[in-house]
Image (tube, rainbow, N blue to C red):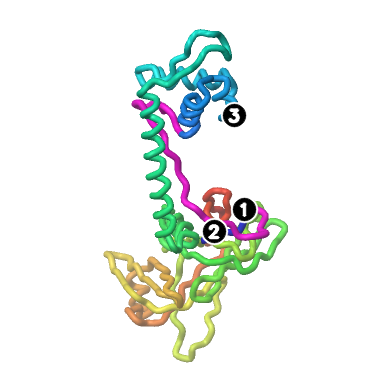
């Protein structure tokens, strides 16, 4: 499992990560760094030496010790008389058990992460999909594709998105939005189109090309027609399994002869398309712009 490094020079492995810490109520008793401090005190018998060993200042070490003592409700570290850097420092039996318990839990946690990482064979490709599935929007149509072209203008840009079945849709958005989303050829993106913005068309018997001002005309096959009191919800499956849904009147559905298995064209304006990108694809956080 790999992904490109920040420099783009070489792939780097994707790994699951996590950490272990102890809590006392809502307060954090300690994680790896504080447990390491306790272990260093046991090894060196000195706050000064322990702080140096774990890369802490003397004051930060004692602050951490005071916090752990308070949250544990009993002493974990006992300092003998002798002044700063002087007398010995020892751990109580409770602190010694805490170190061993933490190390045992941390070992089990590490093994869990290793097993989970090995089990997720397609982690690199599945994780962005999980992010897209979790996206919530009022737009019924959410079409995932790859940016194939960007035609830049003084104010607006025309962005082409290739869908899984090979058909292309076009979105018109401001140049500022293109920059904000970080759109570039090859980037994965999602096109959002409300069902009420989609028109359905059927070709005549001669199969003449349809002439419309709507830039997007996606050909597919009707898979479902759900009728209501006034409107019908029509689903059109495109090549590649992508489904586009349109809401039209029952009268229009009848006039077009729309029924399951019938060919049809989903048409919508380029200005009706909202483009969104995932934080997993750009690293900039989720966003959508029109």
Where does label 3 land, which residue? Answer: 55
Q: Is residue 181 above or below residue 164?
A: above
Q: Are marks 3 and 2 in contact (CB under 8 Å)?
A: no
Residue ID at (37%, 39%)? 105
Q: Secondary structure at mark 3?
A: loop
Residue 14 lies in the magenta stretch:
yes
Q: Secondary structure at mark 1?
A: helix
Residue ID at (49%, 22%)? 64
Residue ID at (50%, 15%)? 88
Mark nearer the viewer, 1 or 3:
3
- Marked residue nearer the N-terminal end (3 or 2): 3
Q: Secondary structure at mark 2?
A: strand
Note whether residue 196 is visible.
Answer: no
- Marked residue nearer the N-terminal end (2 or 1): 1
On the image, the x and y values in percent for residue 9 come to 67, 59
**Residue 85, image quadrant:** top right
Span of residues in magenta = 6-31
**Is residue 133 or residue 155 the one in the foreground?**
133
**Is residue 100 or residue 58 the one in the foreground?**
100
Instruction: Tell me the tag on residue 275.
Output: 2
**Is residue 125 or residue 220 the one in the foreground?**
125
On the image, the x and y values in percent for residue 84 come to 57, 11
In space, the residues marked 1 and 3 are separated at their CA atoms by: 45 Å
In space, the residues marked 2 and 1 are separated at their CA atoms by: 9 Å
Quarter of the image where the C terminus is located:
bottom right
Q: Are marks 2 and 1 in contact (CB under 8 Å)?
A: yes
Where does label 1 land, which residue? Answer: 177
Q: Are marks 1 and 3 in contact (CB under 8 Å)?
A: no
The extreme right residue here reads 154
In space, the residues marked 3 and 2 are separated at their CA atoms by: 48 Å
């Amino acid at each position: 499992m790999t992904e490109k490094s920040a420099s783009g020079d070489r792939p780097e492995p994707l790994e699951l990560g996590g950490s272990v810490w102890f809590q006392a109520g809502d307060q954090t008793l300690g994680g790896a760094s504080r447990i390491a401090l306790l272990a260093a005190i046991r090894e060196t018998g000195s706050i000064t030496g322990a702080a140096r060993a774990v890369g802490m200042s003397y004051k930060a070490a004692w602050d951490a010790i005071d916090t752990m003592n308070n949250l544990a409700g009993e002493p974990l570290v006992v300092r003998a008389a002798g002044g700063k850097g002087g007398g010995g420092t020892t751990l109580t039996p409770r602190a010694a058990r805490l170190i061993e318990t933490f190390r045992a839990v941390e070992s089990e946690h590490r093994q869990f992460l290793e097993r989970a990482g090995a089990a997720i064979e397609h982690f690199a490709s599945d994780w962005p999909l999980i992010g897209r599935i979790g996206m919530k929007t009022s737009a019924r149509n959410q079409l995932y594709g790859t940016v194939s072209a960007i035609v830049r203008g003084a104010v607006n840009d025309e962005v082409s998105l290739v869908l899984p079945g090979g058909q292309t849709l076009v979105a018109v958005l401001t140049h500022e939005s293109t920059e904000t989303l970080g759109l570039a050829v090859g980037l994965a993106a999602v096109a959002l189109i409300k069902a009420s913005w989609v028109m359905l068309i059927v070709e005549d018997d001669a199969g003449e090309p349809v002439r419309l001002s709507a830039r997007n005309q996606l050909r597919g096959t009707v898979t479902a027609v759900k009728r209501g009191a006034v409107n019908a919800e029509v689903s059109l499956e495109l090549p590649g399994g992508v489904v586009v849904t349109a809401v039209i009147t029952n009268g229009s559905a009848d006039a077009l002869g729309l029924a399951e298995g019938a060919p049809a064209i989903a048409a919508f304006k380029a200005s009706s398309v909202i483009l969104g990108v995932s934080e997993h694809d750009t690293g900039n956080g989720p966003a959508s712009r029109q």
